[in-house]
Image: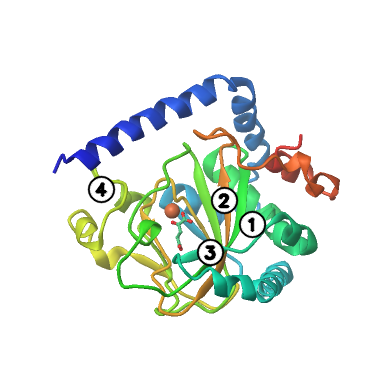
């Protein structure tokens, strides 16, 4: 089992662990501050306590969907971005997925960032993780039908580049078996994947650790919204037969192995109206 590829991954993984620790140590003050500040959000009567506890204890939580005006607005905005991008989309059908959002689209359709920075979702993440998250990025992903061979994140994996990785998935179209639903297993089941495993695992690999029947496959109408601890819960997605469009909001600690992907304070985002929590999540305070 210890083949060369696995040894390389293991080496890379250990290096990643050290790099994460170094980033934390060299930003100790802010790292600790983000933990302290999360305490301010612990209000046991608040409505997001239930999803926060689900996310903390089980590794996932479902959030209110299309019936919420801000969710509907975000879905509509994503659809407009998609139709504006369709021409480009046609040309790029080589990979199994494609990222459709750029800064111009984020600026033109403010409902997308507003959903990414939905206060209740942020508070849920802050309480579950015990720290104020950082908005690493927002992607509008078109997952495209291709070959039957599974690539990359279509296989089981955990996202390893930060000590904290939480993603909010918002489906922009209805997702059934054909649209490659996100699949994952709970925190407890993920802990059963023991020992040294490769970064990507096949269904057969996973079946040795966890009963496949325990896979939670998120199917649902447009507007279906899920928070998943993708850093700790094994997951896969985009095994599509028909195109799936999903907004994927990526929160992390702000102190991942690599530098922050975005410097939101250097963009138009700086001039919008945000709450103190949202500003912290954007890293502009
Ligand atoms: O395509 C998907 O649904 C999953 C993508 C994924 O692995 C991720 O966003 O971390
Ligand atoms: Fe992932």
Q: Select label 1 or label 3 by which is in front.
A: 3
The mark nearer the N terminus, 2 or 3, is 3
Residue 47, numbered label: 1
Identified at 37% across, 56% down, the residue is: 152
- Give neighbour class at mark 2: few <14, some 14-19, many 20+ (Cα, 10 Å): many
Q: Quadrant of the N terminus?
A: top left
Of residues 225 and 44, the one nearer the viewer is 225
Question: In the visual, does 128 lie left or right of 75?
Answer: left
Q: Is residue 224 visible?
A: no
Question: In the visual, does 78 lie left or right of 141?
Answer: right
Q: In the figure, residue 10 lies in which quadrant?
A: top left
Position above or below: 82 against 253: below
Percent across and percent down for residue 143 are 48, 69
The mark nearer the N terminus, 2 or 4, is 4
Q: Select label 2 or label 3 by which is in front.
A: 3
The mark nearer the N terminus, 1 or 2, is 1
The coloring applied to the image is: rainbow
Residue 98, numbered label: 3
Q: Select label 2 or label 4 by which is in front.
A: 2
Write down the residue under mark 2.
250
Write down the residue under mark 4.
193
Q: Is residue 184 visible?
A: yes
């Amino acid at each position: 089992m210890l083949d060369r590829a696995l040894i390389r991954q293991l080496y890379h993984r250990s290096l990643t662990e050290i790099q994460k620790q170094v980033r934390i140590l060299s930003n100790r003050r802010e790292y600790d501050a983000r933990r302290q500040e999360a305490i301010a959000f612990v209000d046991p009567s608040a409505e997001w306590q239930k999803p926060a506890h689900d996310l903390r204890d089980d590794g996932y939580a479902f959030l209110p969907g299309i019936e919420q005006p801000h969710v509907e607005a975000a879905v509509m905005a994503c659809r407009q971005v998609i139709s504006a991008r369709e021409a480009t989309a046609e040309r790029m059908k080589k990979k199994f997925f494609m990222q459709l959002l750029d800064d111009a689209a984020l600026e033109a359709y403010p409902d997308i960032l507003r959903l990414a920075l939905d206060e209740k979702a942020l508070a849920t993440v802050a309480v579950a993780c015990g720290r104020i998250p950082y908005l690493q990025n927002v992607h509008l992903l078109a997952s495209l039908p291709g070959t039957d061979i599974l690539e990359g994140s279509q296989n089981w994996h955990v996202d390893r580049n930060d000590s904290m990785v939480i993603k909010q998935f918002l489906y922009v179209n209805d997702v059934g078996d054909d649209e490659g639903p996100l699949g994952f297993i709970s925190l407890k089941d993920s802990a059963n994947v023991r020992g040294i495993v490769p970064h990507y695992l096949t269904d057969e690999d996973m079946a040795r650790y966890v009963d496949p029947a325990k896979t939670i496959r998120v199917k649902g109408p447009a507007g279906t919204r899920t928070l998943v601890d993708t850093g700790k819960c094994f997951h896969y997605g985009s095994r599509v037969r028909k195109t799936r469009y999903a907004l994927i909001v990526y929160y992390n600690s702000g102190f991942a192995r690599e530098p922050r992907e975005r410097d939101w304070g250097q963009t138009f985002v700086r001039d919008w109206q945000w709450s103190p929590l949202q500003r912290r999540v954007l890293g502009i305070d």
